[in-house]
């Protein structure tokens, strides 16, 4: 438990044990499930934490408010990493009223069998009074689920923002940021955004527009630090990411069966680096694959303007992990990227043409027809310098 202000307590937990967030995304630095108490004449709990942390969560709550009752549980977001202790809290605080919206209600009933009479359904912009403070509720649909809303505590210029502005990575003893926090979490925030929220750039833009009228001085997200000193940096990063804005640089993403496509990727990376072009390399398959896999590749797609995909021809098509990566780009509506494809084959090359076709479906700018080479990698078959000239 940490006291954030005279009214706000952080009562969430760190999860160091989960290996894959949503069953997909690696967590080398863990993740936090943040929950907050707003303590006034009445008490509101904003979101819960994932199941498995019941004892720690309850201890945190007791440390903040002792045996006082909780009057409201605000469910900003229904994804179970934040809502799965709704039933547990109702059992322990039977007088609790759940604050939810019309889209949340059937999810509460479907996931947890929550009785309708326990739920106070609020509309966009509605508020409740806690005594000296007011909580108002604002829908931000599709950031990144349809029921998502944020809660605004006007008396503290604080937004409880659900997953928005969230990041992977556990939080330290002091959840509130300092001068170094933004740089420390920046990459994990981009990875979180690209993995979880990346498809929803337009809804994020709508949410930012909606929140832009509020004098936000503190952001309490469901994941990662509480932002006070870096509010403008965090909002600017979300704005940039949701506009799909990127800088100059190359993201090389490849898979390799016997090391030939990998050797080409390495040669190209060395050539680009020798020219001072920012370059991230992601091997999606095999023993040398990076720990983050496609998760890290997606992060860097949200940083750089050029994607170079490498795939051997496999079953007359694209090597499966690389095809999955390309589909992940499409599902995130990635746009305005430059693209180049390469890869090895043994008897018939098909992967490069198929990669180019997928890139064209996304209206990427093809920087050439690609390089498809037979059997072993050699400098003659794969001219890294000529390819770098295209970048
Ligand atoms: Fe952290 Fe969308 O749940």
Image (cartoon, helix red, strand yellow):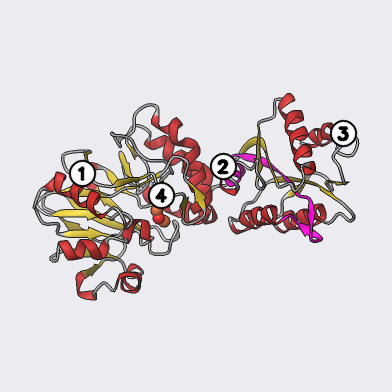
Identify the element where label 3 is drawn.
loop
The quarter in which the N terminus is drawn is top left
The Cα–Cα distance between marks 1 and 3, rounded to whole angstroms, is 61 Å
Mark 1 or mark 2, which is nearer to you?
2
Please tell me whether mark 1 sits on a helix, a strand or a loop: strand
| Residue 345: % across, % down | 84, 51
The image shows residue 121, relative to residue 357, as above or below, that is below
**Alpha carbon separation for disc pair 3 and 2:** 29 Å
Query: Pointers 1 and 4 in contact (CB under 8 A)?
Result: no
The label shown at residue 8 is: 1
171 is higher (above) or lower (below) than 221: above
Between 213 and 279, the residue placed more toward the observer is: 279
Q: CA distance from mark 1 to mark 4?
A: 19 Å
Q: Nearer the viewer, mark 3 or mark 2?
A: 2
Mark 4: few, some, or many residues within 10 Å (few <14, many ≥20)?
many
For image coordinates 86% across by 42% down, the residue present is 376
Q: Which residue is mark 4?
A: 164
Instruction: Check disc 4 and report its element: helix, strand or loop.
Output: loop
Nearer-the-camera pick, 6 or 209: 6
| Marks 2, 4: nearer the viewer | 2
The residue lying at 15 percent from left, 53 percent from top is 43
Question: Mark on residue 291?
Answer: 2
The Cα atoms of the two marked residues, 1 and 2, are separated by 37 Å
Q: Is residue 3 left or right of residue 189?
A: left
Read off the magenta span.
296-319
Closer mark to the observer between disc 3 and disc 4: 3
């Amino acid at each position: 438990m940490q006291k954030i202000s005279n009214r706000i307590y952080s009562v969430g937990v760190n999860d160091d044990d989960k290996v894959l967030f949503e069953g997909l995304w690696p967590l080398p630095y863990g993740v936090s499930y943040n929950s907050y108490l707003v303590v006034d004449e009445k008490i509101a709990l904003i979101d819960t934490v994932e199941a498995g942390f019941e004892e720690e969560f309850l201890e945190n709550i007791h440390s903040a408010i002792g045996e006082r009752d909780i009057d409201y549980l605000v469910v900003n977001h229904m994804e179970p990493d934040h809502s799965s202790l709704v039933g547990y809290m109702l059992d322990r605080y039977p007088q609790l009223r759940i604050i939810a919206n019309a889209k949340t209600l059937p999810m509460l009933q479907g996931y947890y069998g929550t009785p309708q009479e326990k739920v106070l359904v609020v509309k966009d912009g509605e508020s409740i009074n806690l005594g000296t403070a007011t909580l108002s509720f604002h829908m931000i649909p599709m950031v990144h689920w349809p029921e998502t809303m944020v809660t605004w505590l006007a008396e503290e210029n604080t937004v409880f923002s659900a997953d928005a502005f969230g990041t992977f990575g556990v939080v330290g003893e002091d959840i509130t940021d300092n001068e170094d926090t933004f740089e420390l979490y920046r990459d994990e925030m981009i990875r979180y955004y690209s993995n979880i929220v990346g498809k929803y750039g337009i809804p994020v833009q709508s949410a930012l527009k909606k929140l832009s009228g509020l004098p936000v001085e503190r952001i309490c997200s469901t994941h990662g630090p509480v932002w006070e000193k870096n509010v403008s940096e965090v909002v600017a990063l979300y704005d940039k990411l949701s506009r799909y804005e990127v800088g100059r640089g190359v993201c090389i993403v490849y898979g390799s069966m016997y090391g030939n496509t990998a050797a080409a990727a390495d040669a190209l990376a060395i050539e680009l680096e020798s020219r001072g072009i920012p370059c991230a390399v992601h091997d999606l398959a095999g023993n040398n694959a990076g720990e983050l896999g496609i998760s890290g590749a997606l992060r860097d797609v949200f940083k750089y303007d050029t994607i170079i995909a490498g795939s051997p021809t496999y079953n007359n098509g694209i090597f499966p992990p690389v095809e999955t990566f390309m589909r992940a780009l499409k599902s995130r509506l990635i746009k305005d990227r430059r693209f180049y494809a390469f890869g090895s084959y043994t008897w018939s090359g098909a992967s490069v043409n198929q990669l180019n076709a997928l890139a064209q479906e996304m209206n990427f700018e093809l920087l050439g027809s690609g390089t498809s080479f037979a059997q072993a990698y050699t400098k003659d078959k794969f001219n890294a310098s000529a390819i770098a000239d295209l970048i």
